[in-house]
């Protein structure tokens, strides 16, 4: 499963304090069983001193193979330092509903 592979790669690369990889493909008009859209909530000491864009870049670089050849289409990234996570009361953000262009 791509979801498990992503989780393993992120765990190895970032040694997170907290990691949740959620398959949200069903919310994006993807066929049943798809693994193309994921929400990632990760807390890592490696994010200390990095701006949000820098954090996103290193995660996207880590998962480059999954984008190029693994069928991953999109990531919703929620990346925290331990302090930021504690300030957020350790609550994962809720994903907004997806509205495709056909729905508008």
Image (cartoon, helix red, strand yellow):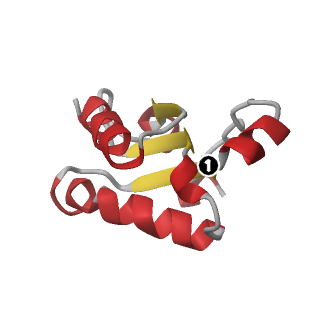
On the image, the x and y values in percent for residue 95 come to: 66, 40
Q: Which residue is mark 1?
A: 78
On the image, the x and y values in percent for residue 70 come to: 19, 50
Can the viewer see residue 19 in this picture?
Answer: yes
Residue occupying the far left of the picture: 69
Can the viewer see residue 96 in this picture?
Answer: no
Up-down relation of residue 100 to residue 87 (above or below) = below
Q: Nearer the viewer, residue 64 or 36?
A: 64
68 left or right, relative to 50: left
How many numbered markers are drawn?
1
**Residue 2, located in which quarter of the rendered image?**
top left
Q: Nearer the viewer, residue 47 or 2?
A: 47
On the image, the x and y values in percent for residue 18 come to: 55, 32
Residue occupying image coordinates x 73% and y 40%: 85
**Residue 67, located in which quarter of the rendered image?**
bottom left
Up-down relation of residue 73 to residue 97 (above or below) = below
Q: Nearer the viewer, residue 8 or 48?
A: 48
18 left or right, relative to 4: right
Judged from the image, the secondary structure of the residue bearing numbered disc 1 is: strand
Quadrant containing the N terminus is top left
1 left or right, relative to 46: left
On the image, the x and y values in percent for residue 25 come to: 42, 38
Up-down relation of residue 75 to residue 86 (above or below) = below
Quadrant containing the C terminus is bottom right
5 left or right, relative to 101: left
Residue occupying image coordinates x 29% and y 35%: 8
Other residues around mark 1 within 10 Å, as few (<14) / some (14–19) / many (≥20): some
């Amino acid at each position: 499963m791509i979801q498990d592979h992503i989780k393993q790669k992120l765990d190895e690369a970032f040694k997170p304090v907290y990691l949740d990889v959620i398959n949200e493909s069903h919310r994006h008009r993807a066929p049943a069983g798809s693994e193309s859209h994921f929400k990632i909530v990760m807390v890592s000491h490696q994010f200390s001193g990095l701006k949000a864009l820098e954090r996103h870049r290193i995660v996207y670089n880590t998962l480059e193979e999954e984008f190029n050849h693994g069928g991953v289409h999109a990531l919703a990234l929620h990346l925290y330092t331990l302090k930021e996570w504690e300030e957020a009361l350790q609550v994962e953000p809720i994903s907004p509903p997806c509205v495709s262009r056909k729905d508008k």
